[in-house]
Amino acid sequence: MIELETEHLILRQWKEDDFLPYSRLTANKETMKFFPKMLTQKESDIAANKFQNLIVKRGWGFWAIEEKETSLFLGYAGLHAPKTKFPFSPCVEIAWRVDKKYWENGYVLDLGKVILKYAFEVLKLNEVVYFSSIHNKKAEQIMQQLDMIKEKKTFCHSFVEKNHRLSEHYLYRIKNI
């Protein structure tokens, strides 16, 4: 199995012990504020199991994040090839979901750098995208720090009701040079 590392973190395959803290993360109102709803325990377990299986199948995906110093589960980060049809499909997206206690410390930016390096140097992808609600300003700052380019047009995410405040999404891209 592929594992990626930053100075403080390890991106690794999911363990059964990750499922409960992940369900707490996906049930946290602040962590999920840019998603249409929080997840139930069952929905969270299904998602974590899917992430785990995709890593087994492909060798990469949304890895569990473990803090090196404490061995604590912090969330997930990685790459995903969504089956959902978007205006920019097919694509591989970079994404993460990290426990709020670990925001504002540079972890996500460091994760983004190592994930993009893996995407371009190992997977030889031509492009990686990121998309989120237009209200997610902190994520936009990270995208800009990763030198990703914002598209002028927004789009409505098909999983979010059109009249929902989180329906409209921006799109960032970065090409392999």
Image (cartoon, rainbow, N blue to C red):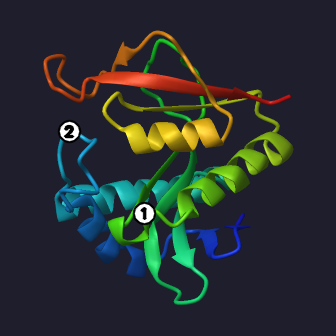
Quadrant in which the C terminus is drawn: top right
Q: Which mark is residue 60?
A: none
Residue name at image x 56 percent, y 64 percent: 107
Residue name at image x 50 percent, y 70 percent: 14
Q: Residue furthest left?
A: 163
Residue 94 in sight from this viewpoint:
no
The amino acid sitting under disc 2 is: Pro
Residue name at image x 54 percent, y 57 percent: 108
Quadrant in which the N terminus is drawn: bottom right
Q: Distance from label 2 to label 1 (Cα)?
A: 20 Å
Q: Nearer the viewer, residue 153 or 87?
A: 153
Q: Residues within 10 Å of mark 1 (few under 14, many from 20)?
A: few
Q: Is residue 82 above or below residue 53?
A: above
Q: Position of residue 133 (x, y in %)?
A: 33, 31
SS for dot 2: loop
Q: Position of residue 113 (x, y in %)?
A: 70, 51
Report the side of 116 relative to 106 (left or right). right
Q: Is residue 24 above or below residue 98?
A: below
Q: What residue is disc 1 on?
A: 103
SS for dot 1: loop
Q: Which mark is residue 36?
A: 2
Residue depth check, mark 2 versus mark 1: number of the one nearer the observer: 1
Q: Position of residue 176 (x, y in %)?
A: 80, 30
Q: Is residue 57 above or below residue 157?
A: below
Residue name at image x 65 percent, y 53 percent: 60
